[in-house]
Amino acid sequence: MTLAAAPSPSVRVRAPGKVNLSLRVGPVEEDGYHPLVTVFQAVALAEEVTATEVADGAGISVTVEGPQADRVPLDATNLAWRAAELLAEHVGISPDVALHLAKGVPVAGGMAGGSADAAATLVACDALWGTGLSRGELSTLAAVLGSDVPFALLGHTAVGTGRGHLLTPAMSRGEFHWAFATRDEGLSTPAVYRRFDELCGPTAPPVDLVDDNPLMQALRAGDPSALGAALHNDLEPAALDLRPELERTLEIARNGGALGAMVSGSGPTVAALARSRQHALAIAATWTAEDAADSVWCTTAPAAGARVL
């Protein structure tokens, strides 16, 4: 009797996408970056990464399943690949792992799906390889990979400063219901920032968290109506200038009674805060009926950060 080979050890980790409840952008600095003050909230749309042990010297491989999987690169440009490579380099081991990504966050929609993949990979490979890094050390590596990656590790609700990577947890009560309208054609984040510079230039005011006091109060109170009124995105005018059709998507949500609606991050996703799960589904159904989105998604927030399943 021939015994089947034992399955290779593997670790599965889930990490959330995000919505920027507020995004305040200052004038570009000499290093080419814009100072940000943003309030992140993790949403229950999530990525799952399974890291599986492979033979020494096999290197990194990436496979993907789920909505829009064909749009995800499978080479070293993938953030999950880069996360495994960075962690291995940091601890001085060979980067040998098979990564399988199950997509649950819209691709190229400004909701940090790639960043969630990177955060999940850091946690999964740390566990698989037994490298024993603290969350603080993983967060430092995460910031090297991208401004949104540390938040995908942390999850829940947080204020981001610097390039968005310096995080302070924020109190939030209750559950919020969201509908998202996505487009198959993405919107380049660098292009949106360039248009922001052209529209605002050096006249953009310095960023200050005090401007978000009403939003922070709404979160602490768990008041969705007040939160909807306080949603803010400095990049929205630039995104709308590049993609004017998004204005109609926003208008449909507002006419449908959304508590607040905005372009999410650098777009092209439109986020609408709803009164309830049923209301979110109704807004999404109207977007579909009016042909104002290529895909629609409904979910809740806040959600936990990257964690082993």
Image (cartoon, rainbow, N blue to C red):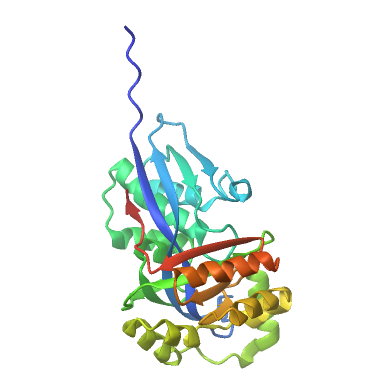
Q: Is there any visible trace of residue 140 in the rendered image?
A: yes
The part of the image, by quadrant, that contains residue 262 is: bottom right
Q: Which residue lies furthest to the top in this view?
A: 1
Please tell me which residue lies in front, 102 or 197. Answer: 102
- Give x and y (percent) for residue 82: 49, 50
Quarter of the image with the N terminus is top left
Q: In this view, does 68 lie above or below 24?
A: above
Seen in the picture, residue 133 relative to 277 is either above or below; the reply is above
**148 relative position to 222: left or right:** right
- Left or right: 134, with 241 as reference point: left
Judge whether 288 appears above or below 164 on screen. Answer: above
Say which residue appears at 50% left-offset and 72% top-offset: 279
Q: Which of 309 and 151 is in front in this view?
A: 309
Which of the 4 image quadrants contains residue 155? bottom left
Identify whether 127 is placed above or below 23: above
Q: Where is residue 56 in the image (x, y as percent from the top left)?
A: 40, 30
Percent x, y of residue 288: 65, 64
* Residue 197 or residue 241, whichever sits in front: 241
Q: Would you say 288 lies left or right of 11 here?
A: right
Task: Determine whether, in the image, residue 147 is placed left or right of residue 123.
Answer: right
- Please tell me in which quadrant of the rendered image residue 297 appears: bottom right
For the question of whether residue 188 can be seen, the reply is no
Where is residue 43? Give x, y as percent.
43, 65
Q: Count the labels in the image.
A: 0
Residue at 33% across / 54% down in the picture?
307
